[in-house]
Each structure stands twice: as structure tokens, then as C-alpha cells.
Image (cartoon, rainbow, N blue to C red):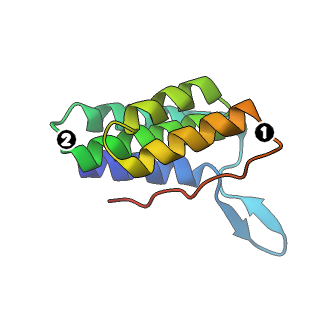
Amino acid sequence: MELHLTLAVHLHSATFEVRQRPWPVRSVRSSIERIRMMREAIAEMERAGNFPLDSIHTGYLYERYGAMMQIWGFNWEALGSYRNAQRWSAEYAMRADDFMNRMHEPDRSAPGPVPSIP
């Protein structure tokens, strides 16, 4: 389970990686490759969710999926996933509330901290 979850997080992170050469260059060459990596990251998240999970990993799975959706601009999917994560931890509940506030009033709120891998 942790292997699938870790792979999903790393695939997703790699879609935004930038290498420093004489000038900054994206590690992934095209949008098509980024989309393929994101699809694979989502598939790995689904595989991780098929295993019996403890509450810490369940909350983290929902939170990371929400973060992936948020970064790609799927805000309602992100909010739904954050709301699912809040059942597992008060930290995730604060993140869900913070995100809802930012959706409601984007100019008046700052992003909250991103939880680390448990």
C-alpha cells in the first residue's frame, strides 16, 4: 500500500520538477507526458486505496488526492477529497476549512501548510 501511495506522490511531484541547466527547464518535456504521469499517479492512488488502510494513511490518501486535484485546477474535486480527509484528522479538517474559505473569498485568505507523508 505504501509503495503505491509513495509512487503516486512522486509521479505527481515529477510533473512539476524543474532542472537547472544554463536556464530552468522542465524535467517532463510536454503537457501530454505530464497528463500521462498524472493519470498514473491517480491510478496508483486508487491501487493504494484498495488495501486496508489505518486512519492515518486513509486521511493522508484523501488529502494528497485533494492536493493533486487542486493543483490541476479541479477545485470541487479537491474540496470533496479534503472533506473526506477531515474525518480522519483535525489537521485535515483545518485544511478543508481553509480551502473552502479560499474558494469563497480568494483575495482574503492565504494557503495553509501541506502535511508531510506519515
The percent position of residue 2, horizontal first and vertical second, equals: 26, 51
Q: How many marks?
A: 2
Q: Residue furthest left?
A: 52
Q: Earlier in the sequence, mark 1 or mark 2?
A: 2
* Helix, strand or loop status at disc 2: loop
Q: Residue at x 57, y 34 (%)?
A: 69
Closer to the camera: disc 1 or disc 2? 1
**Is residue 37 at all visible to an observer of this figure?**
no
The percent position of residue 98, horizontal first and vertical second, equals: 60, 44
Front-lying residue, 62 or 49: 62
Q: Can you say which quadrant of the picture contains the N terminus?
A: top left
**Is residue 98 at all visible to an observer of this figure?**
yes
3D distance between C-alphas at marks 1 and 2: 34 Å
The residue pinned by badge 2 equals 53
Front-lying residue, 99 or 65: 99
Q: Residue furthest bottom?
A: 22
The percent position of residue 38, horizontal first and vertical second, equals: 54, 37
Front-lying residue, 103 or 20: 103
Q: Residue at x 77, y 73 (%)?
A: 21
* Helix, strand or loop status at disc 1: loop
State which quadrant residue 75 falls in.
top right
The percent position of residue 110, horizontal first and vertical second, equals: 72, 52
Residue 83 lies, with reference to residue 118, above or below; the image says: above
10 Å crowding of disc 2: few (<14), some (14-19), many (20+)? some
Q: Residue at x 27, y 51 (%)?
A: 3
Give the residue type at disc 2: Leu
Q: Residue at x 27, y 34 (%)?
A: 49
Give the residue type at disc 1: Pro
The residue pinned by badge 1 equals 106
